[in-house]
Amino acid sequence: MVRIPWSTSRLQRFAFFFGAVNSPTSEDPCQPRSLPSTRSRTPPSRLARFYPAVIGALLFLGGHGSLAWAEQRVPSGIAALLVATLPMWIVVLARLWGAERKLSGRSLTGLVLGLVGVAVLFGPDIWRHSEELNLIGAGAVLLGTFIWAAGTIYMRNVKMPDSPQLSSAMQMLAGGGALLVAASLTGEARTFHFADVSARSWIAIVCLAAFGSIIAFTAYTWLHMVASPSRVSTYAYVNPVVAVLLGWALAREPMGLTTVIAMVVILAGVALINSGHKKQQYIPHRDLEREDAAA
């Protein structure tokens, strides 16, 4: 559920900080009903309201904002490869914060295979634009990826609202507000005019808000309640595969043998990660806290 909407969002860009705000826009009215609900009858505490705001700013301003800024300076293939380091960052931070136990050999092999597959997928584009690499832009992509990973792991170590719908809405509202502040401080908001936005761009924004935010991010928040960090992070490997397939099916973009090989390698890596977790009993973070207290 997370992978397809976030992959389709890569087909359209409405650039920079102001464009990144489309992620948190119309979250509340149309919450997906298919996700298991863990709503509590009691309202969230002050800390349970504070933490989603901090995490939303980290994910959307630090993660998406820096990526939107960097993609104006870095070729998309290089940006995609750098973003694919996300599972590595998540695994390292999860181990440091105690949010995940030791990974199996299969899972580690799968993580490496996934990164190699993304490198093969975007290799021609990276080679073609290697002389155009902007080190500051590339550093911004890596920084944003690290911030997203840090926010993701931090989410597992603090008290969040029990409802994934409420939690995701609070994060996106806070992240959208932070992006609007950033757009105002950089002067972008003053140069934005609604009349300049084409009908095609409005359709893209609506699709991004509906599928990329309401559905995908809510599912992402819920998954972090029930699955391990490394397993959830595999979306970063699968997103390029789905985007390429959609581009081939909907936009008639070419797909060569190298692309097919890369997709097979990526999917093999994801399969290894998932099979590695089947041999390990995953314990959610709250249960780990009880274990530590008992010890």
Image (cartoon, grey):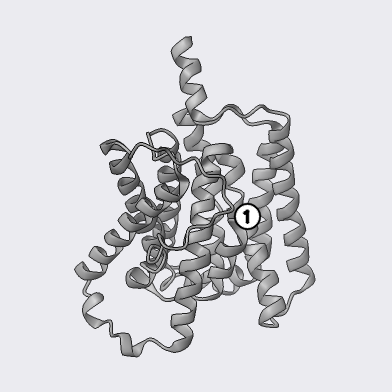
Position of 121 with respect to 180 (left or right) is: right
In the rendered image, the vertical position of residue 217 relative to residue 259, given as above or below: above
Mark 1 is surrounded, within 10 Å at the Cα level, by few (under 14), some (14 to 19) or many (20 or more) other residues, namely: many
- Kindly indicate the quadrant of the structure image that contains residue 41: top left
Count of residue discs: 1
Secondary element at image label 1 = helix
In the rendered image, the vertical position of residue 23 relative to residue 202, given as above or below: above
Residue furthest to the front in view is 41
Find residue 136 and report its horizontal and vertical position in percent: 37, 62
Q: Is residue 88 visible?
A: no
Find residue 192 and report its horizontal and vertical position in percent: 28, 81
Find residue 222 and report its horizontal and vertical position in percent: 52, 45
Residue furthest to the top in view is 295
Front residue of 222/6: it is 222
Front residue of 131/95: it is 95
Residue at 57%, 64% (x, y): give it.
5
- Kindly indicate the quadrant of the structure image that contains residue 44: top left
Front residue of 33/78: it is 33
Q: Quadrant of the N terminus?
A: bottom right
Residue at 48%, 86% (x, y): give it.
200
In the rendered image, the vertical position of residue 246 relative to residue 40, given as above or below: below
Q: Which residue lies under the disc numbered 1?
A: 237
Residue at 61%, 49% (x, y): give it.
234
Find residue 94 and report its horizontal and vertical position in percent: 50, 34
Q: Is residue 122 visible?
A: yes
User: Three-letter amino acid code at disc 1?
Assistant: Tyr
Position of 207 with respect to 62 (left or right) is: right
Residue at 50%, 16% (x, y): give it.
291
